[in-house]
Amino acid sequence: MSQNEAARTPDESGDTAATHGTAATPPAASSASRDERPRPQYGEYAPEGWTWTPPVDERAAASTEPAIAAPVAAPATPASTPAASARPVDRAWTITLLIFGVFGALYNGLVLFQLPSTALESAKLSASMLGVDAPADFVPGPAVPTFIFVGIALQVVLWIGALLWSRSRLRAGRTAWWIPLLAGVAAFVVVLVVGMLVFASDPGFLQSLTPAQL
């Protein structure tokens, strides 16, 4: 290298390099754009504007799907509750028979209440139909009021029991028309039993109705 070349300034050297077609090497980085954060121990910093999205667990997603779908399917359950409308004919017959049962219970109670006063007339009518001597009189025993009270109470209990049982079966969608009929048969049996007890309270009256006098 000659003394003239060594005496050239850096600017002249740069111009010379540009003249010969070679680009000058730029500085590494300016102090303003230099990342002043401490170097991480592992890896490197994420670029600006990048966000991290956590991965989705397939098992957790599968377990949450039925829980989300359950509230949507829940309103469909009330549609299956009106089981009473599944048997409209049975419902109509059950209600009709229960209404007749009310009048039947009232009539049976009235018959039992008037039984001591109508026993003699009933016995005379039965004797005339059978062609036998009618009894002269009827004297009810001391237990007759108790028999009558129990008979009337059973009429009420049978009807209430038929009502509650029929309602429970109608709500369950089962047939219930036979329940008022069963209660009516039981009520008629109660009237017969109480009538026999009332007649038996007078031994002479009961003896006059025995078939031995035919």
Image (tube, grey):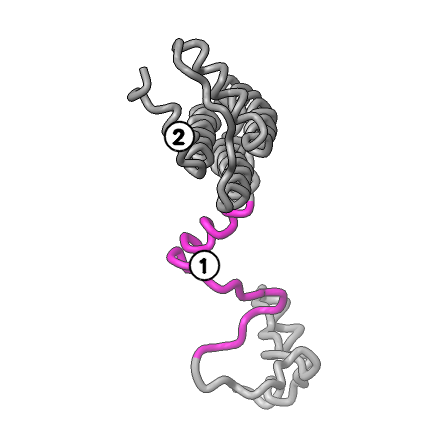
Quadrant assignment, res 58: bottom left
Q: Residues within 10 Å of mark 2 (few under 14, many from 20)?
A: some
Using the image as rendered, state which of residue 197 and residue 14 is in the foreground: 197
Foreground label between 2 and 1: 2
Q: Residue at x 47, y 30 (%)?
A: 191
Circle nearer the N terminus (2, 1): 1
- On the image, the x and y values in percent for residue 86 come to 49, 24
* Residue 92 magenta: no
Q: Residue at x 67, y 84 (%)?
A: 31
Name the residue tied to disc 1: 56
- On the image, the x and y values in percent for residue 60 come to 42, 59
Quarter of the picture holding the C terminus: top left
Secondary structure of residue under mark 2: helix
Task: Please name the amino acid that badge 1 sits on.
Answer: Val
Task: Please name the amino acid that badge 2 sits on.
Answer: Leu
Boundaries of the magenta span: 43-71
Name the residue tied to disc 2: 206
- In the rendered image, the vertical position of residue 132 relative to residue 161, given as above or below: above
Q: Is residue 118 left or right of residue 135?
A: right
Secondary structure of residue under mark 1: loop
Q: Residue furthest left?
A: 212
- On the image, the x and y values in percent for residue 204 come to 41, 32
